[in-house]
Amino acid sequence: LLGYFSCNIYPWGDIYIDDEFQAQTPISGALSVHPGKHVLVVKNQSYKAVSSEFYIAKKDTFFYQLNFETAAAAHSSKP
């Protein structure tokens, strides 16, 4: 069973999970992710890359928000 990663990145970002490119935002729906600990990197050529570690459990959805202009990031997990 997998977990899910969903995000809202402003103005946009390239999403890397465990050094592998996943998608460019905005994305529709959620990305499937294997349960466990992961490293997230969000890149936008106009800003410094932002990285964060996250843990996802089976069937959980990890929500990540980032505003590159204010460098504010927030996240939460829901079963």
Image: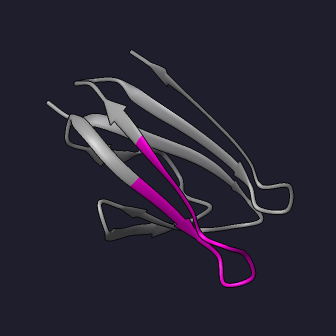
Q: Nearer the viewer, residue 29 or 35?
A: 35
**Residue at coordinates 67% horizontally, 73% vertically from top-left?**
48
Is the residue 21 above or below the residue 29 in the image? below
**Residue at coordinates 35% horizontally, 24% vertically from top-left?**
60
Placement of the C terminus among the 4 image quadrants: top left
**Residue at coordinates 14% horizontally, 30% vertically from top-left?**
1
On the rendered structure, is 78 left or right of 33? right
**Residue at coordinates 69% horizontally, 50% vertically from top-left?**
66
Residue at the extreme left of the image, as rendered: 1
Is the residue 41 above or below the residue 66 in the image? below
| Colour scheme employed for the rendering of this structure | one colour
Across and down, in percent, residue 24 comes to 53, 70
Q: Nearer the viewer, residue 66 or 33?
A: 66
The quadrant where residue 37 appears: top left
On the rendered structure, is 46 left or right of 79? right
Across and down, in percent, residue 73 comes to 69, 44
On the rendered structure, is 64 left or right of 32? right
The quadrant where residue 40 appears: bottom left
Residue at the extreme right of the image, as rendered: 70
Give the magenta-colored segment's residue range: 40-53
Residue at the extreme top of the image, as rendered: 79
Q: How many marks on residues?
A: 0
The quadrant where residue 64 appears: top right
Please tell me whether residue 69 belongs to the stretch shown in magenta. no
Please tell me whether residue 43 belongs to the stretch shown in magenta. yes
